[in-house]
Image: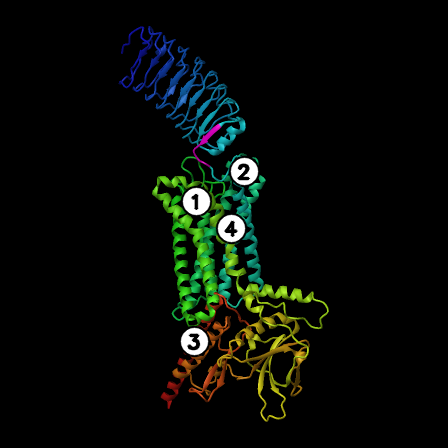
């Protein structure tokens, strides 16, 4: 190796130099540059002696593994030093002792693990420092001591712990450009240095240095959805606990759905509260928050809520699908089996949510130790970018694959349900287009909300696996909206869709408000019922004349017996009596079935009267108990035929029907001497019930209590077989809605099964008797 003694440049780059002798450059004091790309493994002070005019030293792309004490001590005029792309792991604290004129130092692409305190203390003129692409894990408060003129600092691509001293950048007040990996480290730097251009690789779309939620609109959504989800579902839970439901299975499933959605509300309000608490200083708490057990627990709650909610929606949809589409092929879920299914869902959900909390290596970050739930300020492990964070396969399996399958099933199921309902009422579609349109809209909203909540996550999750170049431009604000708005949306609207918007709830609330209004009216002997509108069918209710005239009366009647029918509707405040009209000109006066309501059951009377009025506007049907009139007992003279019969309570409200029979289908089936349920009679009675259901559905009414005790058997000699089924017992009836209509058909299917079973039992009895004879 030789260079001209007085030369200013000596290009020794990309040779195979392994060793440089001491004082080899002794007589080349005017050399300005020495280049790179060899196999030099070590360098000491004597190696570079004599180069007192050297300004640029490029030792990059060599095999240097360490820097000893003052190797550049003779380079007093050195301005630029490049040690890039070596294997340097340790640097002696006095390595740069005599290079106080150095302005550019390049140490990138080595394996430096830490910077000793005071390492750069002699570099008072340094303006550019590259430390990127090393193995730096932490920085001390004195790491940059002495660099008062430093303007550009590159620290990116280092596994720096975010928990560094807050004053680490206090020594570089003149810094103008900083490149670093972590957004939160930029916050430390910006706090110490004004007007700093800090560029971080992980663009934090949720948070700023001051706020956990840097966008006011996102913050508002967090509060609004959190309040809706928490209090909406809490109201649903209280409602379903206090108000009994005829469909106990469906009520149980929806209660569990509300519980899961309630947890989502707790999650959202927790984030909103922390955002308010740490406003103005969030960066101080970011690392401790994301690494805390609290973040893991909150993330687990969110995951538990989301997946249990999805599972409950799927199970609820499956139950409705069986009830409506496959009512005669599969048995409906029993209450016991529903409890078991819900228990299993919660157990599986809890297990799946707790597993990532455990310190399993698979869920810990490869370099920074961040756990599965610690990848963002909202503690959600969303895989919505081309990066592959720890546990991304776990996220894909649960949030993408399972949710997609669930959504696809719900979509297909509701399409089948709607198609089946349309076929059931297809013959009267023109007369009830408004009701069918309302049903279609509600089913559409249910599917649409599911689609809006899940499909963005599913699509983005799939796109993230493709590493599409255009996808990286989408994942910023989209990620924020998915996490804070899209995912919790279901939890906020489910209480409205599945409970609060149903006709039963609106009917109950309407009754409460009506009762409150009536009690506040003054100057009336008895209340006007003009306020008793039906919230589930407001347009219809407004057409009813509820007012009761004081001179409205019925013919005098005598109570002749208390019937044994409709026992499940009877109590000490509601009951039935059979009355006979007092008409001396008639030898056989007609009988009437009168239902009475005590004064505190006024709302139930109003609701049931609205049902009968709505049906009577279409006309009577031979298979539905004929409604005649309704009024207050003061307008009807009722006497008892003998003293053993009960007297009606004072201030009683009445509904009168034509008396058709005192034999229910249940009693008829149990009486083997009355008739045998042979095939013709079975078909006849089933057809009667089906025609009755079709009639009331055409009238916009759902019965909600089809069973063997809500059907009377009337003798009809004008037909063969000479029996007719008459539907009665409308105490649980309601105005039309997409939920209760399927219940009627399910109950009819169950009724048909009971009839066929009884028919088979009677046939076996006949065959046994014939065999014995």
For the question of whether residue 309 can be seen, the reply is yes
Question: Of 401 and 487, which appears nearest the observer?
Answer: 487
Using the numbered discs, state the Cα–Cα distance from disc 1 to disc 2 in whole angstroms. Answer: 21 Å
Using the numbered discs, state the Cα–Cα distance from disc 4 to disc 3 in whole angstroms. Answer: 42 Å
Q: Nearer the viewer, mark 2 or mark 4?
A: 2
For the question of whether residue 344 can be seen, the reply is no
Mark 2: secondary structure: loop
Q: Nearer the viewer, mark 2 or mark 3?
A: 2
* Coloration of the structure image: rainbow
Mark 4 or mark 1: whose residue is earlier in sequence: 4
Quarter of the image where the C terminus is located: bottom left
Q: Find residue 211 and name its label.
A: 2
Mark 1 or mark 2: whose residue is earlier in sequence: 2
Q: Find residue 382 and name its label.
A: 1
Using the numbered discs, state the Cα–Cα distance from disc 2 to disc 3 in whole angstroms. Answer: 63 Å
User: CB under 8 Å between callouts 2 and 4?
Assistant: no
């Amino acid at each position: 190796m030789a260079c001209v003694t007085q030369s200013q440049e000596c290009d020794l780059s990309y040779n195979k130099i392994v060793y440089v002798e001491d004082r080899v450059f002794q007589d080349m004091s005017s050399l300005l540059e020495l280049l790179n790309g060899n196999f030099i493994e070590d360098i000491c002070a004597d190696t570079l002696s004599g180069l007192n005019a050297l300004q640029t030293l490029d030792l990059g792309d060599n095999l240097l593994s360490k820097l000893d004490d003052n190797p550049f001590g003779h380079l007093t005029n050195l301005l630029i030093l490049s040690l890039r792309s070596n294997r340097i792991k340790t640097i002696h604290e006095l390595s740069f002792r005599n290079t106080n004129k150095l302005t550019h130092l390049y140490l990138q692409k080595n394996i430096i693990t830490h910077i000793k305190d005071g390492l750069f203390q002699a570099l008072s003129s340094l303006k550019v420092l590259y430390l990127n692409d090393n193995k730096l894990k932490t920085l001390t408060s004195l790491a940059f001591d002495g660099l008062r003129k430093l303007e550009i600092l590159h620290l990116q691509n280092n596994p720096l712990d975010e928990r560094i001293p807050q004053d680490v950048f206090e020594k570089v007040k003149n810094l103008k450009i900083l490149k670093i990996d972590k957004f939160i480290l930029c916050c430390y730097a910006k706090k110490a240095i004004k007007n700093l251009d800090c560029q971080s690789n992980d663009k934090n779309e949720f948070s700023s240095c001051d706020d956990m939620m840097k966008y006011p609109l996102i913050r508002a959504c967090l509060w609004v959805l959190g309040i809706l989800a928490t209090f909406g579902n809490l109201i649903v839970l209280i409602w379903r606990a206090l108000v009994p439901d005829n469909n106990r299975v469906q009520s149980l499933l929806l209660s569990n759905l509300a519980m899961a959605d309630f947890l989502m509300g707790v999650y959202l309000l927790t984030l909103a509260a922390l955002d308010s608490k740490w406003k103005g200083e969030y960066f101080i708490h970011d690392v401790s928050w994301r690494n805390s057990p609290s973040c893991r627990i909150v993330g687990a709650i969110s995951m538990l809520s989301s997946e249990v909610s999805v599972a409950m929606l799927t199970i609820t949809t499956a139950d409705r699908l069986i009830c409506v589409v496959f009512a005669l092929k599969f048995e409906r879920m029993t209450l016991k089996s529903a409890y078991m299914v819900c228990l299993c869902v919660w157990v599986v959900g809890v297990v799946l949510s707790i597993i990532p909390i455990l310190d399993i290596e698979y869920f810990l970050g490869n370099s920074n130790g961040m756990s599965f739930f610690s990848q963002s300020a909202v503690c959600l492990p969303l895989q919505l970018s081309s990066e592959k964070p720890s546990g991304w396969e776990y996220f894909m399996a649960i949030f993408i694959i399972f949710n997609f399958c669930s959504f696809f099933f719900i979509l297909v199921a509701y399409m089948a349900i709607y198609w089946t309902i349309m076929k059931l009422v297809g013959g009267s579609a023109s007369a009830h287009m408004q009701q069918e349109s309302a049903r279609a809209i509600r089913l559409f909203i249910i599917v649409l909300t599911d689609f809006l909540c899940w499909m963005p996550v599913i699509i983005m999750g799939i796109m993230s696996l493709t590493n599409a170049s255009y996808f990286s431009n989408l994942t910023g604000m989209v990620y924020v909206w998915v996490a804070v708005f899209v995912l919790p949306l279901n939890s906020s609207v489910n209480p409205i869709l599945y409970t609060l918007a149903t006709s039963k709830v609106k009917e109950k609330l309407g009754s409460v408000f009506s009762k409150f209004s009536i009690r506040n009216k003054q100057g009336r002997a008895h209340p006007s019922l003009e306020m008793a509108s039906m919230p589930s069918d407001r347009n219809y209710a407004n057409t009813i004349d509820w007012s009761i005239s004081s001179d409205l009366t019925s013919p005098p009647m005598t109570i002749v017996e208390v019937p044994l029918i409709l026992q499940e509707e009877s109590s000490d405040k509601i009951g039935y009596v059979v009355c006979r009209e007092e008409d001396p000109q008639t030898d056989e006066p007609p009988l009437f079935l009168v239902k009475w309501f005590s004064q505190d059951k006024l709302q139930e009377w109003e609701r049931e009267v609205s049902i009968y009025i709505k049906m009577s506007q279409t006309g009577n049907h031979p298979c539905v108990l004929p409604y005649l009139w309704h009024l207050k007992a003061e307008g009807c003279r009722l006497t008892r035929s003998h003293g053993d019969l009960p007297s009606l309570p004072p201030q009683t409200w009445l509904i009168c029907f034509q008396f058709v029979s005192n034999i229910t289908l249940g009693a008829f089936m149990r009486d083997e001497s009355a008739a045998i349920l042979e095939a013709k009679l079975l078909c006849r009675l089933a057809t009667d019930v089906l025609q009755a259901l079709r009639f009331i559905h055409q009238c916009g009414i759902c019965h909600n209590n089809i069973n063997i005790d809500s059907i009377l058997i009337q003798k009809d000699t004008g037909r063969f077989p000479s029996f007719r089924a008459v539907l009665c017992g409308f105490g649980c009836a309601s105005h039309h809605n997409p939920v209760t209509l399927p219940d009627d058909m399910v109950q009819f299917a169950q009724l048909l099964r009971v009839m066929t079973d009884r028919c088979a039992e009677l046939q076996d009895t006949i065959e046994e008797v014939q065999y014995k004879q």
